[in-house]
Each structure stands twice: as structure tokens, then as C-alpha cells.
Amino acid sequence: MRIAVVGKGGAGKSTIAGTVARIAARGGARVLALDSDLLPGLSFSLGSGPDPAVPPLQQAAQRDESGQWGWSPGIDAATAAQRFATDAPDGVRLLQRGKTGREGSGPITAASKAFWEVTHGLVDAPEFLDWTLIGDLPAGPHQISRDWAPYAETYVVVVLPTVQSALTARRVARLARLQSPQAQIVFVANRVGGERDLSHVERLVGEPIFAAIPADDGVAAAERIGVAPIDHVPDAPAIAAVHELAARLSEQPARS
């Protein structure tokens, strides 16, 4: 399974990505979670807690005398992923682009360059061919149009039952199809209040809904206090729905 989770801000992308990663790892998969968002989210949804103040990945890249970025000595995409990913619950490995902080743009610039190179290098890296890759992309279309998820065999487009969320989902899906014609595109309706909401989302998106995750007070409470929903409310209806989603995603055909 190699997926990139995308959609409008606040749609629940990080919660879904983190929970799917934990479920896959519990099922025996070796999982690398790829967090390319500069804002916090995936580490909390995984249960890893706050992000590090300085992104470890910044050590993987350096400028040469002409000012061009390249790998630090002895580093390539697979080595960077192995060395600078951190441990998360259930054996998930988390590789973060990094978060903006008081250190300024320097660490993020280096880490961003390295992260982009890692996402491309992992496509065919022998060390990761049998790994599950789960990417959590920032809101909107920017990173999709800049090819930040070339590893994705499936784009999971998360959409809420609102017009704004559906418009973003349609735009994101269109860009993903242009950027990665061989990838599967699936829509996941999140925080659905019932069949009426589900029909509303399907009508707004104009395509079938692959999976629906119900609105869930327990998950909302976990998000408010910054803990992993799968730990806080493991038996919640929304978590059960994500289990079903993870199972269906694992059955999606791999890209040849």
C-alpha cells in the first residue's frame, strides 16, 4: 500500500493518515509515514507527541560552493529515510519535512529539499519496495502540482459534507490525475452525519465515495487534546470505519 492523503484544510487528513498507518503496522506491515506538512498534525494523530524543534532531516542535505542543494556525504534517499525517520507507536516510522519555528527558514529549507528528494528516491529504492508508504500532504493542491508524492499508487481525497470541501476535493483529484495518471483516486467522506450527508457529498463531488467515516465525538475529543484517536477511543465508530478503509486500501492494485 502506497497512498497520499490529500484534501482541504481541516478535513481530517492527518487523523486518517495516522490511523491507517497504525492499523497497517498492527497488521504486520513495515510502515513509513511521510509528513510533508509544515503545520503540526500527523505526529499527534500517530501518537508520537509534539514535533521536534529542529527537523532531523536537515542533516541530510547541504549546499555546495555554487549554492546548489545536494545530499550530505554518504546520504541518499533510502539512507535518509532510514537514518532520520523517528519511531512512532506500533512500529511505524515517521519521516517529517519539519515544522517552522524560531530557528528561521534555514533548517526547513534543507529539510524540504531532502524530503522532496526522498519521496522521489523511495519510488524504486530496493530497501523500501516491500514497505507501506503513507503520505500526509498539506491542504490544497500545491504539493500535488509540485509532485511531492510520486510514490503514491492511490490518492485518498478526504472530503467533508460542505461545498467548500467538495470543491477543493474535486480540484485536488483533477490535479492528481494530471500529475499521476496511473494512480488510483478515491474519495473518502469524513465526519458524515448519516445517509443524507453521504448523498450530499457524493452529489457535490460528482463521483462515487470509496468510504465514509462517521462524525464521532470521541475522535473530536482526541484531536482537541492532541492524542491519537486510535489510542483514545479505539472502539469508536469512526475508528472502525478507518479499519474498513485500511482493509480496502490494502486491496487496491499496485502500480505496475
Image (tube, rainbow, N blue to C red):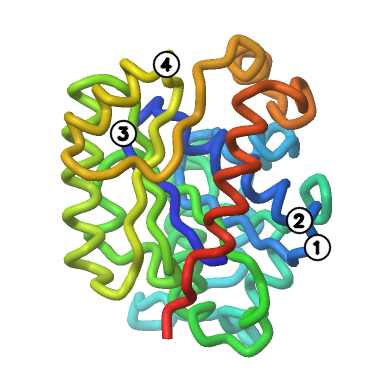
Residue 127 is labelled as none
Residue 86 rendering spot, x and y as whole percentages: 74, 55
Q: Residues within 10 Å of mark 4 (few under 14, many from 20)?
A: few
Few, some or many C-alpha atoms within 10 Å of disc 2 (few <14, some 14-19, many ≥20)? some
Q: SS at mark 2?
A: helix
Q: Residue at x 62, y 46 (%)?
A: 20
Side (left or right) of 139 relative to 228: left
Q: Quadrant of the N terminus?
A: bottom right
Which of the two residues, 114 or 195, is positioned nearer the viewer here?
195
Task: Decide: few, some or many residues near mark 1? Use Cα within 10 Å; few <14, some 14-19, many ≥20.
Answer: few
| Above or below: residue 228 compared with residue 157 | above
Is 237 positioned to the left or the right of 62 in the image? right
Reply above or below: 137 against 147. above
* Residue 28: mark: 1
Q: Report x, y in % for residue 228.
A: 71, 30
Location of residue 206 in the rendering, given as x and y in whole percent from the top left corner: 16, 40
Relative placement, left or right, of 146 versus 238 is: left
Residue 233: image quadrant is top right
- Compare marks 2 and 4 and give the one earlier in the sequence: 2
User: Are the residues tagged 1 and 3 within 8 Å (C-beta)?
Assistant: no
Q: Residue at x 77, y 22 (%)?
A: 232
State the separation of the CA atoms marked 4 and 3: 21 Å
Three-letter amino acid code at disc 1? Gly
As measured in the structure, the alpha-carbon distance from the residue carrying label 1 to the one carrying label 2 is: 5 Å
**Residue on which disc 2 sits:** 25
Residue under numbered circle 4: 194
Q: Is residue 107 visible?
A: no
State which mark lies toward you, 4 or 3: 4
Find the distance from the CA under tag 2 to the CA under tag 3.
Answer: 26 Å
Is tag 1's residue or tag 3's residue first in the polypeptide sequence? 3
Q: In this figure, which residue is indicated by the disc labeled 3?
A: 8
